[in-house]
Amino acid sequence: MAMRGLMHVSKLLPATARVRVSSFWSGVETGPPDAIFGLVEAHKKDPRPNKVSLAIGAYRDDQGKPWVLPTVRKAEQRIVDKNLDKEYAGIMGYESFCKEAYKLAFGEDDNFKNNSYVTTQTVSGTGALRLAGMFLNKFYPEAKTIYLPNPSWPNHNPVFKQSGLEVKSYRHCNFQNMTFDAAGCYDDLRSIPNKSMVLFHACAHNPTGIDLSLDHWAEVSKICKEKNHLVFVDMAYQGFATGDLEKDSAGLRLLAKDGHKLVLCQSFSKNMGLYGERCGAMTFLTESESEAKAVESQIKIIIRPLYSNPPITGARIATEILTSPDLYSEWLDELKAMAGRIFEMRGKLQQGLINEGSTRDWSFIHTQIGMFCYSGMNQEQVKRLQDEYGIYMTKDGRISMVSLSSNNIGYVAKSMHEVTK
């Protein structure tokens, strides 16, 4: 009776009211799938038994399974044993985590000693980038444009555009031989307006795996100082690129030592496997402690209506590992193991292509570094891999090296050879 009455009342409403109730979202257009997670969904639906997903950057063991670091499991248990509460973190996050994240990136430098910096916990690296973009859009009036390397992580573009910034690029990759385009990079950094915002990948450049040498970093630092550019560093893979925390942060530390008052975004998704915990940090290097306090106050004003405060579990795990000598030592070994497996897969993929009879020069597979390999394959070849062989990768030909294993690498090499010969 109640349902009949409801239906009866709806019939009594004016036609215009009935239309309005049923068409609130009629103007919403269906958007395109995410460039990466859309491929993950397509791979899941593919019925072929030999399908391979090389799209997403999440570490897998040699059986293709997600790997939770043993140190993370141990840290979790220690946290449980402490019987801690679940109270909110402050707006800036878990204080001890922020201090340890800074030290991991920069070491015990002068900024750490005189407090002329501000670090806030963020919703992983993506949240750090968005938060930084919003801050810079509001407080860096000299430029409303950020310059990204070409190519760069696909999500950089929408993150900064939706922060209110214009996005342009400078040269990074020499697409002829898949190496760093040093001359092009330097020329572009000199030609863009003074005080421009320029983003660099600290290590394991995504998507190319083409990193700068220390000599390259020194020249970049020199040019950016001459042009008074604001340096922005995205460091998502410290320790995950070479297996050495110091090597992977060497470029960043050189920039800091040269006096750049830079912006840093960090992620602990990769190097601690804390993907779903969304654990990251953002740091501003400033001129003084008073300047740092002013910056911190404005960061809080942005965060409070955005997400109020960040989640605590991932930050507690990271802090436990970074402050426990035994866990920290074990974690260093885990980093070396993960980086070592990726390096091994690079060698096997290159050799597999050679064994298939490919006459192309695939040596760059072994010289690139980090989670991804920029294969040089075009969109047509990538589409053939997906359609004919069930191998999924992003349109730019980026291969997630962590998704390769002893079980699929032969099939991937053979398929790549078929579409590129």
Image (cartoon, rainbow, N blue to C red):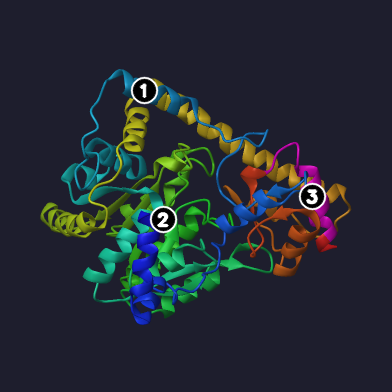
At 65% from the left and 62% from the top, the residue drawn is 178
Residue to which mark 3 is pinned: 413
In the rendered structure, are the residues bearing label 3 and label 1 in contact, judged by CB atoms less than 8 Å apart? no
Residue 211: x percent and y percent?
A: 54, 55
Residue 229: in magenta span: no
Q: Nearer the viewer, mark 2 or mark 3?
A: 3
Name the front one of labels 3 and 1: 3
Q: Quadrant of the N terminus?
A: bottom left
> To which quarter of the image does residue 217 belong?
bottom left
- Examine the rendered structure and indicate whether residue 373 appears above or below residue 273: below
Q: Position of residue 283 (x, y in %)?
A: 28, 52
Residue 316 lies, in percent from the top left, at: 31, 32
Q: Earlier in the sequence, mark 2 or mark 1?
A: 2
Crowding around mark 2 (Cα neighbors within 10 Å: few <14, some 14 to 19, many 20+) is many
* Left or right position of 115 against 326: left
Q: What kind of residue is marked 1?
A: Pro
**Highlighted magenta segment, given as a residue range:** 404-418
Q: Which residue is identified by label 2? A: 234
Residue on which the image places disc 1: 325
